[in-house]
Amino acid sequence: MKQYLPHKTPHSERFTPFLEQGKTQRPLYRGLFNYIQQRILSAELPAGSRLPSSRELADLLSLSRNTVKQVYEMLQAEGYIETRHGDGSYVSPQLTLSRRTTQRSPGPHTRPIRLSAKSEQLEQIRPLYQQHKQQLLLPAVPALDQFPWQQWQRSVTHASRGMKFHTERDFMGEAALRTEIAAYLTATRGIHCDMRQVMICSGSQQGMQLAFSMLLNPGDRVLVEDPGFPGIDGAISNAGGIKLSIPIDRNGFRTDIALHHQQDARLAFITPSRNFPMGYTLSLERRLQLLEWARKQGCCIIEDDYDSEFRFDGPPLTALQGLDGEHSVIYSGTFSRILHPAMRLAYLVLPPALVDPFNRMRGFMDGGLSALPQLALADFMARGIFSSHLRRMRKLYKTRRSYLLQQVTQIFNGQLRWEPSDGGMHGVFLLPPGIDDKTIVEQTMKVGLGIRPLSYYYDKQPARSGLVIGFGGYDEARIDAGLALLKPILEHHLKS
Ligand SMILES: Cc1ncc(COP(=O)(O)O)c(C=O)c1O
């Protein structure tokens, strides 16, 4: 039996609100479709009710008949209406939906989606600072104004031409890039590897996520430096691991303390070339102790070598991986700091025994990365642009650091004490006792500075108060501008 729309709501009342609400939406047919769909879902157009003919509706809304016909066809294709030959169009009789299930915005009966216990744990973890590119003196920003853009564009063009013939994919990454990275690491970092051990990742953050999930069982302990890199906290927690925060001193990670936990720990995550953020280098004696521990216990060491290319007084130090004999160390490097943070390209060098299991997991995890940026970077490296850019940046950062040190000493009369480090892209400056770095940074952030409080990088150990100031991405004028913003804030705290 036909069920007509109730008499007191003729078509004009039902459909003319579209003229105000939906007619502004483009394309027009999408606006009308959405309008009628919503009326059906909210049961304003009840199941089984008859719709006006396409001619009637077109006249009513001053639309072309073709537009209305197209909308009716779409509604029919998606099951909202039925068109009965020679009779007309009806809201599908089986659409007896309650308002509750069809309301777009959540109502009192809508239960929120439940997160896994794992994701809820992430809320307990110290949040990462958001970076804004207009902030000055951010610690991990390279000199983007010095990046060889033209050469990079050439590499991108070359890579995109190559894509035409590129059909296969490898979860480990593009062979051309892996070959370049293996050659670069062998020549400059004393690393033993061939390209088959190199896995390309979307930032070292992804590499860590993968490594922790492959190496940890829930409840396993991970030895980490304190202070250290907070970016790994989420990855450890996500894999069910538990951090054991180990203090550092000027010789780096305190192996004497760490190895007390040797029974518990399954993995160590360290920055041996330059501790993040303090800049200390792990001594040879401690390197050997760690390697021995890892071998005896069947444990793994993840060596995060995030910016050791920028050692100012001499060539980069040999990586821990180079001492290892390809057994226990996973070496992690990134292009975020050397080239561009948004490139999101990094790599792991895996011990041969881990290549197959990691490769298998990668297939399930993301199926590998997009080929284009990898091929572009491979070309950029093969043409020697990468190494000459690195050499230039090493000199530039050294000059920028000297300038920052000189200005800080002059402006703050030695009250900010530099913690010596042999390179990098940021400096750590200790504050006089009793001055809280977090309060200062809350204020400096408001005026557009990206300086970080040193205490933020501490986990369990008593935190030192200081400022982590980036210089890599800033020329003298911008260092001056940044320090001019810092000066009144810091002076206020130094006086009070
Ligand atoms: C110590 C350290 N390790 C790793 C990373 C992460 O690098 P990526 O950008 O490749 O994820 C950073 C980023 O700044 C870092 O400071």
Image (tube, rainbow, N blue to C red):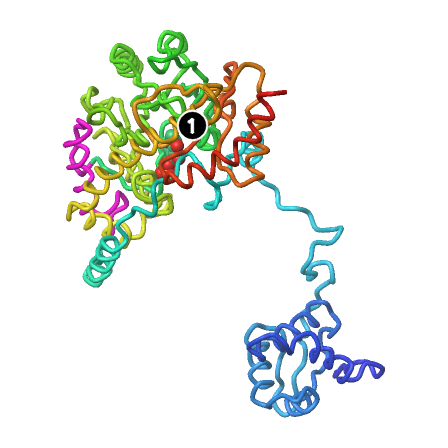
- Which quadrant is home to the C terminus? top right
Q: Residue placed farthest to the right in the image?
A: 8
Is residue 209 in view from this perspective? no
Q: Nearer the viewer, residue 43 or 166?
A: 166
Q: Is 22 placed above or below 358 here?
A: below
- From the viewer's perspective, tell me whether residue 100 is left or right of residue 272: right
Q: In the image, what residue occupies the spot 60% across and 90% down?
A: 65
Q: Is mark 1 within 8 Å of ligand 1?
A: yes
Q: Is residue 32 magenta?
A: no
Point out the stretch of residues depicted in magenta.
169-196
x, y (%) of residue 423? Answer: 30, 27
Q: Is 30 placed above or below 388 here?
A: below
Q: Nearer the viewer, residue 271 or 417?
A: 417
Q: How many marks?
A: 1
Q: Nearer the viewer, residue 346 or 445?
A: 445
x, y (%) of residue 4? Answer: 77, 83
Is residue 314 in view from this perspective? yes
Question: Badge 1 is on which residue?
Answer: 229
Assign ligand 1 to one image quadrant.
Answer: top left
Q: In the image, what residue occupies the spot 85% across and 82% down?
A: 8
Helix, strand or loop for disc 1? loop
Tell me where residue 388 sits by quadrant: top left
Tell me where residue 278 sits by quadrant: top left
Amino acid type assigned to the residue bearing label 1 in the image: Phe
- From the viewer's perspective, tell me whether residue 76 is left or right of residue 411: right
Q: Is residue 189 magenta?
A: yes
Q: In the image, what residue occupies the spot 78% across and 81% down?
A: 13
Please name the predominant secondary structure of the magenta segment in the image: helix
- From the viewer's perspective, tell me whether residue 365 is left or right of residue 159: right
Q: Is 273 placed above or below 471 here?
A: above
